[in-house]
């Protein structure tokens, strides 16, 4: 059996906090949460970057209104949009093209995105992980000094099962999990009543079961999707909606929690006596 | 969750000492460490009966030395040995148990 590939550690001294946003399952709205959280953090006055680590299915460019490939000759990367510095594979390939890569190439791409672009000094770098517990996640947790992670789920049991796996992955690699974000929790209908079409309480239950904080319920609001498709995140466009407010409050909680983590002390190196 | 090591030192190339944050101190001989390599090929080798007629490689003829011990993320260490072997990743939990 061949040796595992070398995984050199990446140093990112200009970035104060690196937050990974994960979900066990696809389709729970993780990228929407990543984008709105990043913008909400920026609206609090922070310098924020957003890395779309989903090489196979990058969705961040659309959500920020960035269309088509980027001409690197004229537009430096990372791209600045809505106050964020953003990088995605989606800037380099057309949406119709499928990336068919194996692990080592994913690792190389993500490493390049992190180390060869000028992110400048950032207070927060939000990394939108692809769903699951595969190559991108392994690369990032082993080589990047992640400060912490959050796990996004919907209330249903079927997404909770996968969210649990995402959580366990972070436990295994000792990345602190700040908590669970439950997306599509509920919506407020025209009658003013709260409806829970995807069941309820799942996120809180997961948080309890895994002894991590429950951070937020993000409501269903058709504006979230409209804003996503239009490329103008709801927290910036409609901050007073329930969803906009939820992201705003979430950003404050995340700032507080990240500031409470003692400075990441790396593992000690070997001394030879 | 296992404590985190505060200090790791190799003394006289014989014993790896790990001072853990909770005060516990591990002292592991390097032969025990090498024989306990958790990588898949070593585990497979260890399960086979040893072959007294196996020709030793030149790197195995020299005394075993621990060359490098690099952190992997925040959960373990990769050890590089003088016999050329370096595919084992020793998790903190595993080191604690040795």
Image (cartoon, rainbow, N blue to C red):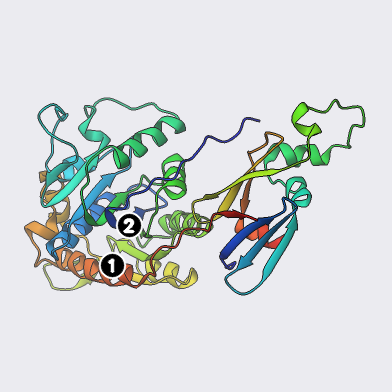
Residue B12 or A159: which is nearer the viewer?
B12
The image position of residue A145, as x and y in percent, is 40, 53
The residue beneath circle 2 is A19
Q: Residue at x 21, y 53 (%)?
A: A121
SS label for mark 1:
helix
Seen at 70% across and 64% down, the residue is B26
Q: What residue is shown with label 1?
A: A254
Depth check: give the residue in front, A235 or B76.
B76
**Residue B62 at x, y percent in the picture:** 78, 35
Give the image location of residue A91, x and y in percent: 20, 33
SS class of the residue under badge 2? strand
Q: Is residue A116 above or below residue A96?
A: below
Subunit under mark 1: A
Q: Left or right: where does residue A215 sit relative to residue A164?
A: left
Q: Nearer the viewer, residue B18 or A254?
A: B18
- How far apart, in angstroms, are the residues tagged by discs 2 and 1? 9 Å
Question: Can residue A29 be seen at all in this image of the molecule?
Answer: no
């Amino acid at each position: 059996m061949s040796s595992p590939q070398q995984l050199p550690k990446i140093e990112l001294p200009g970035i104060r906090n690196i937050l990974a946003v994960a979900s066990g399952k696809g389709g729970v709205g993780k990228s929407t949460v990543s984008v709105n959280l990043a913008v909400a953090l920026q609206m609090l006055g922070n310098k924020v970057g957003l890395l779309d680590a989903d090489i196979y299915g990058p969705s961040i460019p659309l959500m920020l209104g960035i269309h088509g490939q980027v001409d690197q000759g004229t537009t430096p990367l990372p791209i600045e949009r809505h106050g964020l510095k953003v990088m995605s594979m989606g800037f380099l390939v057309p949406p119709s093209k499928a990336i068919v890569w194996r692990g080592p190439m994913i690792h190389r791409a993500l490493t390049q995105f992190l180390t060869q672009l000028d992110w400048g000094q950032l207070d927060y770098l939000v990394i939108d992980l692809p769903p699951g517990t595969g190559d991108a996640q392994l690369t990032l947790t082993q080589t990047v000094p992640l400060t912490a992670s959050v796990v996004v789920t919907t209330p249903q049991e079927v997404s909770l099962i996968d969210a649990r796996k995402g959580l366990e992955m972070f436990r295994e690699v000792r990345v602190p999990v700040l908590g669970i974000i439950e997306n599509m929790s509920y919506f407020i209908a025209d009658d003013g009543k709260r409806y829970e079409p995807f069941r309820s309480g799942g996120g809180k239950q997961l948080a309890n079961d895994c002894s991590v904080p429950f951070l937020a319920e993000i409501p269903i609001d058709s504006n979230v999707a409209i804003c996503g498709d239009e490329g103008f995140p709801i927290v910036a466009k409609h901050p007073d909606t329930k969803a906009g407010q939820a992201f705003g409050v979430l950003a404050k909680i995340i700032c507080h929690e990240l500031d409470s983590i003692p400075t990441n002390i790396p593992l000690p190196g070997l001394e030879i006596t | 969750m296992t404590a985190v090591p505060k200090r790791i030192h190799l003394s006289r190339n014989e014993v790896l000492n790990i001072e853990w944050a909770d005060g516990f101190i591990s002292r592991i001989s390097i032969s025990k460490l090498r024989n306990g390599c958790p990588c898949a090929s070593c585990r497979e080798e260890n399960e086979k009966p040893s072959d007294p007629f196996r020709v030793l490689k030149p790197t195995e003829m020299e005394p075993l030395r621990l060359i490098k011990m690099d952190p992997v993320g925040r959960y373990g260490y990769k050890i590089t040995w003088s016999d050329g072997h370096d595919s084992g990743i020793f998790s903190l939990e595993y080191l604690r148990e040795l």
